[in-house]
Amino acid sequence: MRHFPLFMDLRGRRVLVLGTGKVAHRKAEPLARAGAVVEMADRFDAGQLAGCALAIGADAAETELVALFEAARAAGIPVNTVDRPALCSFITPAIIDRDPITIAVSSGGAAPVLARLLRAKIEALIPPAYGRLATLADSFKAEIRRRLPDMGLRRRVLERLLGGRAADLVFAGREDAARAEFARALESDEPARGMVALVGAGPGAADLLTIRAQRLLGEADVIVHDRLVTPEVLDMARRDAERIYVGKARANHCMAQEDINALLVRLAREGRKVVRLKGGDPFVFGRGGEEAEALAEAGVDVEVVPGVTAALACAAQAGIPLTHRDVARSVTFVTGHTKQGRLDMDFAPLVRSKTTLAVYMGIVSLPQLRDGLLAHGLPAGTPAALIERGGTPRQRELRGSLDELVDQAAAWSTRGPTLVLIGDAVGRGVGWSRTVPAMALVGQAFRPAVA
Ligand SMILES: C[S@@+](CC[C@H](N)C(=O)[O-])C[C@H]1O[C@@H](n2cnc3c(N)ncnc32)[C@H](O)[C@@H]1O
């Protein structure tokens, strides 16, 4: 983070704006809206800075702007000069004003236009009524604190109100009904009830999370996560949510599955809102089924939120179709996990059915997989791909025939999570990727039509 964001109370404080043109007025307007006493001047005089909380250099002459910057810095007064990073001790963000809610967006000066585009997106996402919702919540603040002294319970009640019916009522313009909803929630002495959401974290990129996953991450008291969950996704959780890491790398289980189940049950029984965050999809090779069963048996409410599983993320980013009308009419997810070093797989139907194979945890057992498939009749030249850290900006790919890949895999791998794709469809598609600029397809490569 290049700049530390903070919101300043400028009510009744003097702010000097140097310049009297369009830019100066554009800068002065939000300052005045925040209650500042804005003084505008064409020329700089050191005396003008006395008692100022901020100084802004806008469309005055260069010598005046430099003089303002130096004098303000010497006096310890924060100063910003429009479009002149060298003459700034602070920068001004793009603002979304939903008074009393203010959202500020900054690119740290790197790309102000991008920050403004982001602001436009956020403006569209957040209805103006959010300000009214915040005002309503504010009017109940003292009473809520008095009636619900426990901070956790207070937060849960507020989350239920602000993320649910009361918010819907405000957005529909029915403030009186929303007020009644608040009053009812405060009357009820319903005990806090914990719950667990088994949430798919997708392949690692935060923008591949579902909207439901994002909402639950924002509401959870505790996040129980495993190794595949990236810091970028964890950052979507509430800052003060407790984070519990439970493993697991291959052959390095940080916590046994039974202990994870018991932990989830205990946390829910404490009345906490738990997100059990799992890489990809919780029900695809994620032991989500076992956890859901254990929770249901213990009488804990459980919700399952799907995530983008590795096969989908890898294939999409690599431009590889998983099915293709001409060559693959099904896709099969299999695990390459071995038991006592042996790959226990029924190869015959996999070879017979013209499927695209998506092999999870398959890098170690790749030679056994190749031998089994070839022994059952799969041609050695069948297109295949290894995709490491798929669906993230660090995705890497290795493509070739199945035979070639097996030979190169060990030297190529950097030990990130890797998916193996095998089948004729792997040789089709657009073959674009962020890491492989040229098409490196085997088999029948797709050639874009030239107009
Ligand atoms: C225990 S499984 C979990 C699968 C996960 N539940 C899912 O739906 O993607 C772990 C395996 O998934 C695959 N995997 C997970 N994330 C991946 C990624 N970003 N890129 C490539 N493969 C990945 C690897 O084969 C890894 O060994």
Image: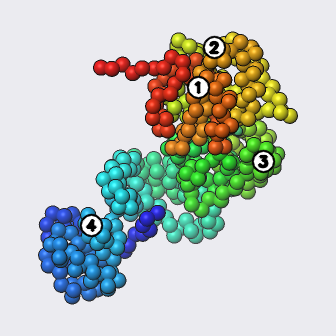
Tell me where residue 162 appears, x and y as whole percent. 50, 54
Q: Is mark 3 within 8 Å of ligand 1?
A: no
Q: Amino acid at mark 3?
A: Asn
Instruction: Give residue 434's mark.
Output: none
Q: How many C-alpha atoms fall within 10 Å of the one at disc 2: few (<14), some, or many (≥20)? A: some
Q: How many marks?
A: 4
Q: Is residue 63 left or right of residue 96?
A: left
Label 2 element class: loop
Which is nearer the N-term, disc 3 or disc 2? 3
Q: Does 407 appear above or below 125? A: above
Label 1 element class: strand
Q: Amino acid at mark 1?
A: Gly
Instruction: Give residue 252's mark.
Output: 3
At a point 55% along the width and 54% down the height, the residue shown is: 235
Q: Amino acid at mark 2?
A: Lys
Q: Is residue 285 left or right of residue 41?
A: right
Q: CA distance from mark 2 to mark 1?
A: 18 Å
Q: Is mark 2 within 8 Å of ligand 1?
A: no
Tell me where residue 174 appears, x and y as whole percent. 40, 50
Q: Which residue is mark 1?
A: 400
Q: CA distance from mark 4 to mark 1?
A: 51 Å
Q: Which residue is mark 4?
A: 84
Q: Is mark 4 within 8 Å of ligand 1?
A: no
Q: Are marks 2 and 1 in contact (CB under 8 Å)?
A: no
Label 4 element class: loop
At a point 77% along the width and 38% down the height, the residue shown is: 290
Q: Nearer the viewer, mark 3 or mark 1?
A: 1
Which is nearer the N-term, disc 4 or disc 2? 4
